[in-house]
Every structure is written in structure tokens, then in C-alpha cells.
Amino acid sequence: MSAQWQEQVSLKPYNTFGIDVRARYFTEAHNDDEVRQALADARQHDVPVLVIGGGSNLLLTADVQALVLRMASRGLRILADDGRRVIVEAEAGEPWHPFVQWSLAQGLAGLENLSLIPGTVGAAPMQNIGAYGVEIKDVFVGLTALDRETGELHDFDLEGCQFAYRDSLFKQHPGRWLILRVRFALSRVMQAHLDYGPVRQRLSEQGISQPTAQNVSDAICSIRREKLPDPVELGNAGSFFKNPVVAAVLADKIRLQYPGLVAYPQADGQMKLAAGWLIEQAGWKGHREGDAGVHRLQSLVLVNYGQATGLQLHQLAQKIQADILERFGVRLEMEPNLY
Ligand code: FAD
Ligand code: NAP
């Protein structure tokens, strides 16, 4: 094994569920050369590689018999600026929320609705992170990734990433692409997206009718802090299930029995159901099995009260999935990446 690798490292500080499993080997990469070196060493020693960022979208169910390669590359830069549209590039290891704050401090709008999402820039394209009506695809221009099969660099444009709801080409081909840096088109003129959840209401309560991007970011941060558990205090990986998109006839059928069904029409005629609402109706809100539980305020979030294992959390998730399927005929898909 390589001299840079540590052995038998606890991954507890490296996943926001706080699950205490071990990595057989662990190392960090601060630049492209270190990424290439780690991959070459792993290949030479026939060791599989798991790339991680902030570990905020992982469910680790066993010790990881691999080299865990944590992306720690840093760098933020402006590539082009025509006075209105500004192209910025961020290295994969940059923490996401500080990147959003940096962009706002440059007077750039576009990322404000994506404030306070944990994790790194490099993982953001994996599931096309989204919140409050904006997804990274809306401000994305390109990324550079290393093809782990060929060792070649590849530039992806928007179309090439095949972004969809919490999905992308990269999520569809796990382990193939290592994202090195991502480029976004931001704007000196804000196009506000306020009609999602309580954002507009929160701003009007503060007497703000013409919000700046910073105002929107601040409002979203305060809403998120009220609703979501802070992983530093209570282990979690955010939403545990994707919101299911179902046929309109199924939504109508469920509504007959549950008139309060929360459903949003999609462009293709299907309906997106609020998974958290379904889970709450089924009585799981606040449910606890040992140290694995469903958050008491937000049913979509599974939490680790301390010593839960990844397997216990996974078993709880499977029970919820089976119950929701039986009650509503709706299949819930897990959002975090299972290892
Ligand atoms: P990790 O968990 O480290 O990795 C996730 C996946 O990406 C893994 O499969 C990993 O192998 C892969 N990966 C990581 N880095 C790279 C790379 N450089 N190249 C290739 N593959 C890589 N998500 C949302 O979409 N919207 C939200 O509003 C949101 N809110 C959240 C709130 C909380 C409290 C928490 C805990 C999570 C939330 N999430 C949200 C989920 C999560 O923060 C995001 O998915 C985030 O982008 C994950 O980044 P990460 O660096 O932690 O990725
Ligand atoms: P919320 O505002 O209580 O809304 C519940 C669900 O309804 C959301 O998941 C959202 O779907 C959907 N929704 C709300 N208003 C909508 C609208 N106008 N049009 C279409 N769909 C609408 O949700 P929340 O749990 O507090 O989260 C707020 C935002 O942050 C959401 O966008 C959510 O996705 C995001 N978030 C994501 C994670 C994660 O880990 N993935 C964690 C926390 C928060 P969408 O999820 O499709 O947006």
C-alpha cells in the first residue's frame, strides 16, 4: 500500500449520519496529481476506491473494504465576466455552502436558493442538488471529470450530465466518473425564485418586498435551521427518500381516501407527491427503534440518536418503504448512496 494511506480509519467524522464504520484505507486528495496518484496506487494494489466529499449523502452499512478517497481540493475563481453573466469555477473539495456565500459576497445571484446544503461542490452534480425550486442544472455550465476507466479527463456540458430530479449520468454510473471541478453561470441581476414553500412569506414578515440574493439566502437559511436537524447535533443525511413522481390516476385514487394529499403537477402530467407527508400520514413521524429514528419535525429525515448502525437505519427505511407501498401503492426510493 501507499505511504500516503492511513489504515483502519473510523469514518464517523466523515459521514453526517455519524456511523462508526472503518475504512480499510483512507487518504485525501488536494489536487489532480494526488487524485491520479491515489487511483494509480489503488490499481497497483488491486484495492477498490470509494470517493467521498462531505459524507452528507451516504449510508454506510459495513466497514468499507476499499480506499476511501476524500476530495479536499480547494479553489474558487471567476473565469469570465461580461458585467452581467459571470462564469465561476469551483474545485470539487470546496464545501458547498461557503461557496454559495462566496458567490453572494461577489454580488452574484443564482445559488441563493441552494444555501445551507451540506457537502462539497464535487458531489453536487451527482444528484443535481435542489432546494426551494432551484436545481444546480439551472445555473450549471460545465464540469471536468476524470474517467476512472481510461484515466482521461472529460469536459461535460449541461446536456452531457443528463440531469434529472435528484439524478444525473454520474449517479447512474457509480464509480466511473471522478468530478474534479464544476462551472456555474451566475448573474449580477437576480431572478428571484420565491414561490416555493414559505420563502416569500418569510421575507414579507421581515418587511422585504424587493429582496436581494443575500436576503433570499438568509431567509432560506433561517427556514432550514428551524426545520432540519443539524448533523453536528443529530446524525442525518437530509431527505432519506426522493419525492415519488406517480401517475395522476394514482394520485387521484389516494386523494379519495386522503383529501389532504400534498401533490404537485409535473410538466409531463404526472404528480410529485411529498414523501414526508405520506410517511407522516402513515404514523412514522417521531418513531424510534433503538437509536435509529424518524425525525420528530420532518418525517423525510431519518436520524441517528447516537449509536445506530447503518444496517439499523436501512432496516427502518425498508419498513417505511414496505408500509408506504402497502398503504398508498407508492414505491419510495432511497436518496442517500448505500455502501
Ligand atoms: P458525499 O455524501 O460524500 O457523496 C455522495 C455521493 O457522491 C457518493 O456516491 C460519492 O461516492 C459521490 N461523490 C462525492 N464526491 C464526488 C466527486 N468529486 N466525484 C465523483 N463522485 C463523488 N441534497 C439536496 O439535493 N438538497 C438539499 O436541500 C439537501 N439538504 C440536505 C440537508 C442536510 C441536513 C443533509 C445532511 C443533507 C442534505 N442534502 C441535500 C444531501 C447532500 O447534502 C447533498 O446530496 C450533497 O451534494 C452531498 O455532498 P457530499 O460532498 O457530502 O457527498
Ligand atoms: P417543504 O417546503 O415542506 O415541501 C415538501 C415537499 O413538497 C418538498 O420536498 C418539495 O419537493 C415539495 N414542494 C414544496 N413546494 C413546492 C412547489 N411550489 N412546487 C413543487 N414542489 C413543491 O420541504 P422541506 O422538506 O422543508 O424542504 C425544502 C426544500 O429543501 C425542498 O426543495 C427540499 O427538496 C430541499 N431539501 C432537500 C433535502 C435533501 O436531502 N434532498 C433536505 C432538506 C431540504 P422537492 O423536494 O422536490 O423540492
Image (spheres, grey):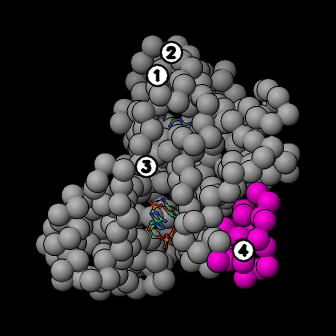
Q: Is 239 left, or right, of 283 in this rendering?
A: right
Q: Is 268 left, or right, of 65 in this rendering?
A: left
Disc 4: which residue: 203
Secondary element type, mark 3: loop
- The amino acid on which the numbered mark 3 sits, given as a three-letter code, is Arg
Q: Nearer the viewer, mark 4 or mark 1?
A: 4
Q: Does ligand 1 reach within 8 Å of label 1's beta carbon?
A: no
Q: CA distance from mark 1 to mark 3?
A: 23 Å
Q: At 41% from the left edge and 43% from the top edge, which residue is drawn?
A: 164
**CB atoms at circles 1 and 2 under 8 Å apart?**
yes
Q: Is 69 left, or right, of 317 in this rendering?
A: right
Disc 3: which residue: 166
Disc 1: which residue: 148
Residue 293 x/y as whole percent: 39, 78
Q: Which residues are magenta?
A: 201-223
Residue 212 x/y as whole percent: 80, 60
Residue 163's place in the image compared with 154, above or below, is: below
Secondary element type, mark 1: loop
Q: Is 329 left, or right, of 27 in this rendering?
A: left
Q: CA distance from mark 4 to mark 1?
A: 45 Å
Mark 3 or 4, nearer chain start:
3
**CB atoms at circles 2 and 4 under 8 Å apart?**
no
Secondary element type, mark 4: helix
- The amino acid on which the numbered mark 2 sits, given as a three-letter code, is Gly
Quick one: label 3, few (<14), some, or many (20+) residues within 10 Å? Answer: some
Q: Which mark is residue 151?
A: 2
